Amino acid sequence: MARPIRVIISGGGTGGHIFPAVAIANALKRIDPDTEILFVGATGRMEMEKVRAAGYKIIGLDIQGFQRKSLLKNIGLPWKMIKSVMKARSIIRDFRPDVAVGVGGYASGPLLYAANQMGVPYLIQEQNSYAGITNKWLGKKAERVCVAFEGMEKFFPAERILLTGNPIRKEVVDIESKRFAAAEKLSLSPHKQTILVTGGSLGAGTLNNSFLAGIDKIIDADVQLIWQTGKFYYQMVKENVAERGIENIKVMEFLYKMELGYAAADVIVSRAGAGTIAELCVIGKPVILVPSPNVAEDHQTKNALALANNSAAIMIADNVAYRDLVDTALNLVGNPGKCRLLADNIKKMALPDADEIIANEVIKIATNTKL
């Protein structure tokens, strides 16, 4: 009897990399429960905890990214890279994978480089509309590059590209007919216009400061606010809202059941990470995107423009958000026609089955290798 397919999945660093990686693993297990999966991440990064919590084994590499703000912190990077490639080779020798999958993040580069050296075929899952340097380089030798945006031929060989979308958390986008239940759980009225503000688990200073500056306008408009601040801004925002005794504004450090926020909201204000955008497309609600300027190659702006250029979202630049964001959100929530247009157009860009499409590609590559 043939042995089960073995797959290494590498990458992480942020939820935007980890959630798709786990979604692909879960899809592989649904298709073939005997599939053996090993994750490789970066020691000390959040994947070491999140992947184990999802029920998978993970091994860490001592690797970091290039520090643009402090060149001195990069002195040890070449040695860490060499050590990581050596450890990746050892992991591959021990696990004997049929295929490797890279989802981006620090660990992805050394693992896929080692896989290529050792004759293990690999697949890249590129989440953004602008590919980073490592993925562009690795993409030349990849069996398949699964992308979430059109026009990626400028980064990868056209014959290797497959438009799949980004894998999403299925439970988070399952919001059909759940507005009233979600509003009740959040102690909000289902009959009032509601804005969801989310800057991710760490938070976004621009979003938080912009809404703090416009809090009086929100009160005057009698609009409800679900405000996920992130851990760095939670105390400041909570104290400011508590001083005013505002019932319409629900402040939380992190919304663990994101589906409640998505279901209750009429308008969503968010950063423009690729994973978040993939969820928002499936949800199909009007969105305002404020791309973070603090990311490699300014890829969030390019992600947001891919929607804004199709009238599928409103994009506001980070440097004008303090002035424009709250006014734009309130104008949008009061404009049903514009809301319908944005919702219809963003829904057209949804690719909801990315996890299973990618998983099937992984199995194809692995099966060809084993023959």
Image (spheres, grey):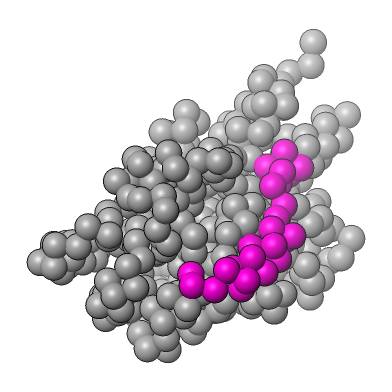
Q: Position of residue 204 (x, y in %)?
A: 35, 69
Residue displayed at 55% across by 79% down: 315
Q: State yes or no: residue 339 in magenta.
A: yes
Does residue 21 appear to the left or right of 44 in the view shown?
A: right
Relative to 244, residue 143 above or below: above
Taking the view exactly as shown, the residue that stands out farthest to the left is: 243
Image quadrant for the C terminus?
Answer: top right
Residue displayed at 59% across by 47% down: 168
Q: Position of residue 50 (x, y in %)?
A: 42, 41
Relative to 194, residue 121 above or below: above
Q: Nearer the viewer, residue 76 or 175?
A: 175
Residue displayed at 53% across by 58% down: 276
Q: State yes or no: residue 323 in magenta.
A: no
Q: Position of residue 96 (x, y in %)?
A: 66, 32
Residue bounds of the magenta highlight: 333-358
Q: Position of residue 158 (x, y in %)?
A: 86, 65
**Which quarter of the picture shows residue 337?**
bottom right
Q: Main secondary structure of the magenta part?
A: helix
